[in-house]
Amino acid sequence: MAFFITSDCTGCTACKSICPTSAISGEKKQQHAVSDAACIDCGACGRICPAGAVANPFGRIVSKIPKKNWVRPFFNLDLCMACNICVEACPANALDTALQKIRDLHPYPFLVRESQCMGCGFCAQACPVDAVTLEKSAG
Amino acid sequence: MNIPGRSKGCMGSIMVVDLSARTIEIQPVSAKVYRTFLSGMGLAAHVLYHRIPQDADPLGPDNMLGFVSGLLTGTGSLFTGRWMVTGKSPLTGGWGEANCGGHFSPAIKRCGVDGIFFTGTSPKPVYLYVDDNTAQLRDADSIWGMDTVETETLLTARHPGARVACIGPAGERLSLMAGVSTDKGRMAARSGLGAVMGAKCLKAVVLAGSKRIPVHNKEAMKHISRICNKWVQFQPPFLPGFLTAPVGALLRIMPWAFTQDGLLYKVLLRKWGTVSMNQISVEMGDAPVQNWKGSNSNWGFFKNLSANPDLFTRKEIRKYHCYSCPLGCGGICRTKGRHPRTHKPEYETVLSFGGFVLNRDLDTIFDINETLNRAGMDTISAGHAVAFALECFEKKIITLQDTAGMALEWGNPEAISWLVDQIIARQGIGHILADGVAKAAGRLGKGAQRFAFHAGGQELAMHDGRNDPGFALHYSVEPAPGRHTNGAWLYYEMYRLWKKVTDAPKIPLVYAKARKYETGPDKAAMGSANSRFLNVLNGSGVCLFGAFLGIDRIRIFDWLNAATGWHMTPEDYMAAGTRIQTLKQAFNLKHGIVPKDFALKGRPVGHPPLAHGANKGRSIDIDTLMADYWETFGWDRKTGRPTDPQIAEVTDIS
């Protein structure tokens, strides 16, 4: 199962640039294609495509969402167990850990590279204790 | 890179890299193999049994080196971040395995495979780089010679977000005490597999994949994880560190024993890490002292106070969690030595360079810890090598002429540090010691083998079989001998297997301590259950410290079914553990190992018995323990050989 690109593609390369696994290939101004083997179904290509040319694995066209409306992970440190599962689940390498609680030396996750976050929600899906929620960025 | 279809929980394939031919191939693994041997160590045993030829030189091109991840890694389960290095051990000539935490285990699966296996030998230094689209051998000339921290720093700068496993100078110089490092100081240290990596001219494995790991029932996984986490987060206040020694003394004095509950150990591990056991172990007789000839009598309270766990947490600047671990027993510490930071020394390191060499200087231990981590060398084996050298100096087998004038005296921190540096550099006396105590004793001659304590060539860990004969049994009887993670009576009590597995003998809440030292069918059943369950843990990538919580609190069998979609019973999983054990034993037999030769000899089994201390007068009947253990598997009592049908059952799977 993988996302795929329809003939509406204008070859703008936006999807190719954002794909965290370099699963998309294609020349500028030509229709792009998604590699089934490399696609991880994060959907970033669909959210960024200005032409509405990306379909999800079920064939439904994914609507473009303005970047400012993309969801971002927020971490409930009272629930978080600092297990790093979310950090490793992030395909965009946007998360890292750091000391955040006073007098608590455990390293908790945070969004260290916000510009790299694609709002895929893999971190929230992976968290075993539901300590990660997805919300629109305050900015 | 063509990646075949996946099954649940596992990725359904392995990567095979031929370093001689410079080819990289993805090979599918059948569902039957996973059901028979799980993944992780079981998968590795299946691959290596068939692909390493009988007379392969462990440091030659025919040996295979495998990096494998567990079946539960990345499935939403907890305590499942362990990865394993496997191959034919140059120390023992038989099955070799080393186990490590950190963040490398999910990285293997996120590259779309359950294991990466290397064969052949590269003519020049290389490292393997894998991401979602490529797998390449890249030139490592510029990083050959760097220590593990420098190597990882450089490679992660070059490949942001990647996870790295690498060797240091010890592996490059083919020291048989070399291991494989990740996270700048977590070591897969045992079995000498760093030397195998060095012999292949493979400096590092760099993984940057983002594949998703398929799970059958995600909600069930989360539900079980939440139950497990509640037990982990239960953390009542505990004693100050200096009172851990009296606790150990109390355990020593009492004529009866309580069934140990891993929840108590969890509290200690969360507060201090493994160093919590330093003084308890010395006082109760669990920690060997002075190359197995000492005891708590000559490393008593005021001396072992230097290992007070509070002294370690005072230097801790942050906790360290392995992947998917809610406990966080690790830490990053400040040091005063040659390096500003180090991973918090583990119990094994502290005792190896503390009581085992009668060293009371904690700063030296921190410095040696980082020095060995950077060199990529096993601290347990290195501690044994140093203690062996100190005793040989005491007995005048090694003289001042051999040491360039350095007096190798017990407890002299300067001499101990100097020896470590010599061993890493393979200079002078260090060259003799760098391949472990068995080889060093052979090189020195003059009766030095009387002071070299090992199981089949592998140095023993810092747990004394004279206190818990289960350690002595598992040091002797396992295909990869001499390792403390293999099992003990203590481990069996904490696993609480009788709560889920019908044939696991139940331990009474209170029992006479003398029972620990008896042999009999119950002991053999406990030993066998330890080995079989450990194979399940290593097939799943589960951390021992998680398993210590007890099988009713950390529900590994339920996690396995939820992750894979299988409907196997605990007994089915234990049967898989039996098959893995048989396969590893068959591996050793194929490579000419005589299982009885791994039996401990001399001081570690109380021959002669200690005249003082916690283990005074104790001798372990290791031959009976081993024979009884083999019999529970249906193997030959005298030779440890499985029957031909048993071997055929595990080797005919494809």
Image (tube, coloured by chain):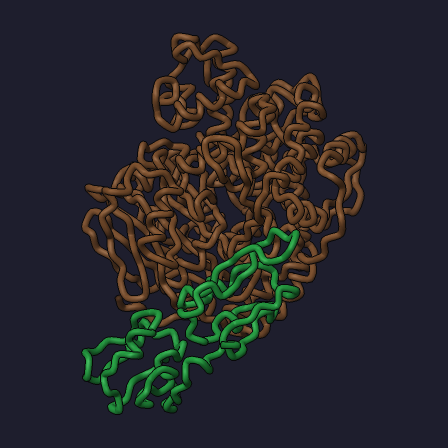
Chain colours: A green, B brown
Quadrant of the drawing holding the N terminus of chain B? bottom left
Q: Is residue B639 visible?
A: no
Q: Position of residue B42 (x, y in %)?
A: 45, 54
Q: Residue furthest front?
A: A139
Q: In front: B377, or B294?
A: B377
Residue at 72% x, 48% y: name it. B264
Identified at 33% across, 56% down, the residue is: B159
Count of numbered labels shown in the rendering? 0
**Residue B89, image x and y in percent?**
39, 38
Vertical relation: A16 (above or below) A81: below
In the figure, B248 relative to A138: above or below? above
Q: Looking at the image, can residue B525 be seen?
A: yes
Identify the residue at horizontal 36%, vertical 58% (top origin).
B160
**In the rendered view, does B319 fall on the left or right side of B417?**
right
Given residues B625 and B466, the one toward you in this image is: B466
| Residue A55 percent coordinates (x, y) | 35, 87
Q: Nearer the viewer, residue B8 or B73?
A: B73
- Vertical position of residue B36 compared to residue B198: above or below: below
Q: Quadrant of residue B438?
A: top left
The structure residue drawn at horizontal position 44% and vertical position 12%, both measured from the top left corner, is B406
Residue A131 left/right relative to B389 = right
Quadrant of the image containing the C terminus of chain B: bottom left
Q: Is residue B358 above or below residue B315?
A: above
Name which quarter of the figure residue A38 lies in: bottom left
Residue B491: x %, y % from top left: 64, 45
